[in-house]
Image (spheres, helix red, strand yellow):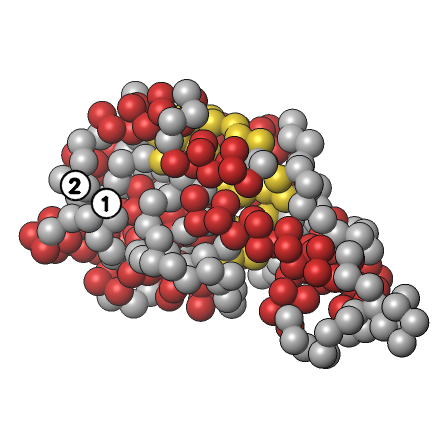
Amino acid sequence: MDNDLTALLEDVPAPDDAAAAAVRERATNVLRPTGALARLDDVAVWLASWQRTTRPSVSRPAVVVFVADHGVADEGVSAYPAAVTAEMLRALRQGAATAAVMARAVGAHLEVVDVGVGRPSANLRREAALDETRFLRCVEAGREVVAGLAADVLVCGEMGIANTTAAAAVSAALFGGPAEEWTGRGTGIDETTWTAKVAVVDDARRRLPQDCPPLEVLRQLGGCELASIAGAVLEARRRSLPVVLDGFVVTAAVAPLEAAAPGILDHCIAGHCSGEAGHRLLLDKLGKAPLLDLGLRLGEGSGALAAVPLVRLAAACVTDVATFEEWGL
């Protein structure tokens, strides 16, 4: 299994340094004090390097929300029953869920992909969440949906009751540290449920050897939508498609890629830092500073969608603002 995925991590495109340098140069000469919008300029340069153009823009953003059930929900780690996942899938498809509304508001194409609703992963506390065949099938599902997009920026979202437990377990196994540091309140659980959730995360992490390969960590402790997100973001890198990362679950889903091949997530920017306990810690481990820090904790791609207009604005503030020379100064 590792060999199949490892091959996909190799021979990926590098950023377009020439396009990045041109946009950086323009940003230093537009009609404003040098560095006045430094962070936004950095975003524009990043976007240019992966869109491979000196005129970066966000005109065709797309959000793909992967939805699945988790066997670990049987451990009582969420404030909501597993049946909620199916209802949220229906709401997303009918345009009534938050991510669907936000996608419309920012002009993003929305795809909702069922990769395991009614077909839960195994209980990761006690056994591998996915067998090798299903894991690879989920990764491929993520790759296929991205391959079919006509987008210039990608957002991946997720929905699955108990998936913050999976995210905490993956993060703890990859980077170590107490399970308490990685385990948050998810859907708003009380102290008793949180304590039980911490125990589940700790038990799951301890099943694996300390030198467990990163992609095997994802198979063992993730779930269908986490594997699909990893596949989607990997395919985006292979197509030089820039990605705005969402919250804890999405970031945990792609962290094994970076652990397996450092630099593979250079085409990704952190859209926001969520209210989940482990997300800020995980972003620090990955070296990604969030664009927004609003304490959001919904998932569905919502935090990244909130950041999309900022990415669009960053590009416009370099490409559409006149330079001093163009203005005759």
Q: Secondary structure at mark 1?
A: loop
Indicate left or right for 121 with 15 as reference: left
Q: Which mark is residue 87?
A: none
User: What residue is drawn where x is 29% and y is 67%?
Assistant: 177
Indicate left or right for 151 with 208 as reference: right
Give the residue pinned by disc 1: 187
User: What residue is drawn where x is 44% and y is 49%?
Assistant: 303
Q: CA distance from mark 1 to mark 2?
A: 6 Å
Binning the other alpha carbons within 10 Å of mark 1 as few (below 14), some (14 to 19) or many (20 upward) gives: some
Marks 1,2: beta carbons within 8 A: yes
Measuring from the top left, give residue 259's x and y in whole percent: 50, 58
Measuring from the top left, give residue 311's x and y in whole percent: 61, 54
User: What residue is drawn where x is 85% and y is 72%?
Assistant: 324
Q: In the image, is residue 28 above or below residue 132?
A: below
User: Is there any visible trace of residue 158 in the rendered image?
Assistant: no
Amino acid tagged 2: Ala
Q: Quadrant of residue 88?
A: top left
User: What residue is drawn where x is 33% and y is 50%?
Assistant: 297
Measuring from the top left, give residue 25's x and y in whole percent: 81, 70
Q: Quadrant of residue 45?
A: bottom right
Q: Which mark is residue 79?
A: 2
Compare residues 254 and 190 and report the one nearer the observer. Answer: 190
Q: In the image, is residue 49 above or below residue 1?
A: below
Amino acid tagged 1: Thr
